Structures are given as structure tokens and as C-alpha cells.
Amino acid sequence: MGTDDGEQSSGSAALRIILGAQLRKLREAAEISRAQAGYQIRGSESKISRMELGRVGFKPRDIADLLTMYGVCDPGERSNFLDQVAQSNQPGWWQRYGDLMPRWLDNYLGLEESASRIQTYELQFVPGLLQTEAYARAVIGQGMPESLRDDVERRVALRMRRQKVLARPTAPQLWTIIDESVLVRKIGGREVLLEQIDKLLELTTMPHITLQVVGLDITGYAAESPFTLLRFAEPELSNIVYIEYLSGALYLEKPDEIETFGRALDRLAVAAETPEHSRQLLKKRRAEL
């Protein structure tokens, strides 16, 4: 999901993917090759491929030329498509944090905002969408020099802003599975962890948020590293597995890849405590602190 040739990836990643899929259908219906379409907009076959995959922003002039080439002449249809192009190029709210964000996170935030279901597995930390401000500060600020305190606070603000997706009327279903060690690790100290557990207990009373805990006595993990599976209601959007590592991230969307990680989540859900038992475990862990 990265970008090439200096082209920017700001705006709505999900809308770009939908528009790209529509462009591909129009091109194929007109029996025009990617190379021919690229020549029409003074570009290359690979540029058309990236546009159709929604991996780059769209220039209105390019889209207008392609619509003409594909035989889309109705003024209303053209105007509607170009309006959506303009919308897809609008910077997301997270762009104000662009100087702090790694490049690979930009597309993820746009997709997270558009997902109908978010499934995540975490081994070390409480997932970012469920963190308290103090817990997030402890995670983000670990090892950061005092001179970068302002950067830490802005990163915390970014994480807190992301959580608003769960408060929307059209909030996605969030299903998260964590290792019990997350509840043992006193990130930020005892009081920070107490507050974090209280927040988890509060959030898991909401009908669209589910939390399961994989107990410490469970052996043979179904997954060896954290990952997130984003599912979308729009048929043009492929489900996506997001795996972040120290210097980058992977976006997996092939059906067999989605199936592999979906099955891993199923096995984890079976191995983990039920949502109700997980809440009891949270209360037990809180009493022990």
C-alpha cells in the first residue's frame, strides 16, 4: 500500500481503492489495455496499475481524460466521479501529524476509519484503540529523551484521536485478543495499569467491543506476532491484514493470506477465555495489583 515516484498517499485510502476498482471496470469494459490508458494520460502502465489499486492519489485532469477514453460522456456521471476524486484527495485528520508518522501508517489510518470490523491480536501491549492516555504515554515515551517530550505528547494525541472511530454512530465492530502477560506487565507503573484495566472493563460493556484474554497457561500459540485484520462492508474493498514491524509494515490482501490469518484468529478465540471470563480475569488482575 505504499506509494511510488513521489506520489502522495494522503486522503481517503478506502475511497481511492473503490474509485480505482471502478476505473478498472470501465477500462476493461472499453477493452483498453493499461499501456494504452497510461499513454493517454502521459504516464505508464504501472501508473494505471497503481491508480486502479488505489495506491496513489488521482489528478482530476488524468481522470477526466480516462473517462473520455473509456466512453463516459454523461455530464452528471462525470461530475459525480470527479467530485469523488476531489473527496479522495482531501487530507485526513491525521495529516497534521504527518511529520511524526511513519509513511506506512498513513494508509492504515484511512483504512481503519473505513473498516466495518477490526480484529486484532496483541502480545505485548493493550491495543492502541483501547489505551488510556497515561498508558499510551508510557508506551510511546519509553526511552525517548526529554528533548522530544513535545513529540511524545503529539503522538499520544494522535493515538487518542484514533479512538474516536469507536464512538461514531457507525463504529466498527472491534474484536481484540490479548495475551494475559499484557495485564501483568506494569507499563507506566501500578496506577497506570489499574486505570488501563478499568478502561478495558468499561469499554467491554459496549456491544461493539469484544475482548478475549489468552491465559498464561496456554501453550502452542496460533500466531507468533501481533497483527490486525480489517474487514470492509464495501465489495470493492479487499479485507486487509496489517502487520507492523520496527522499520515498516506489511499489507496483505490475497485471499489465501486473509484465510490464514482469519483461521489463526479463530484458533486464538477458541484457546482464549470467553469474553465474560476475560472480564472476570480483568477484575481478578485488578484486585491483585
Image: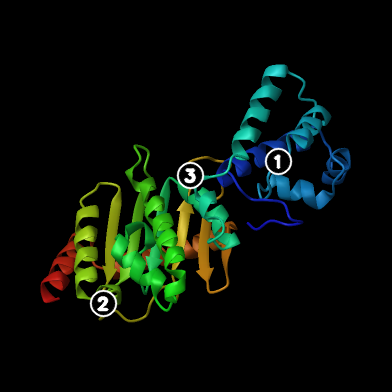
**Mark 3–mark 2 contact, CB under 8 Å?**
no
Residue sticking out furthest to the left: 287
Q: Check disc 2 and give the amino acid type.
A: Lys
* Residue drawn at x 75%, y 34% as measured from the top left: 63
- Circle 2 sits on which residue? 186
Q: Kindly identify the residue that appears in the image at 20 percent across and 51 percent down.
A: 205
Q: Which residue is mark 1?
A: 58
Of the numbered discs 3 and 2, the one sitting upstream in the chain is: 3
Are circles 1 and 3 on residues that touch, CB within 8 Å?
no
Q: Which residue is mark 3?
A: 114
CA–CA distance in space, label 3 to label 2: 33 Å
Position of 173 with respect to 251 (left or right) is left
Q: Could you tell me if residue 30 is visible in this image?
A: yes
| Callout 1 amino acid | Phe
Q: CA distance from mark 1 to mark 2?
A: 46 Å
Q: Nearer the viewer, mark 1 or mark 3?
A: 1
SS for callout 1: loop
Labelled pair 1, 2 in contact (Cβ < 8 Å)? no
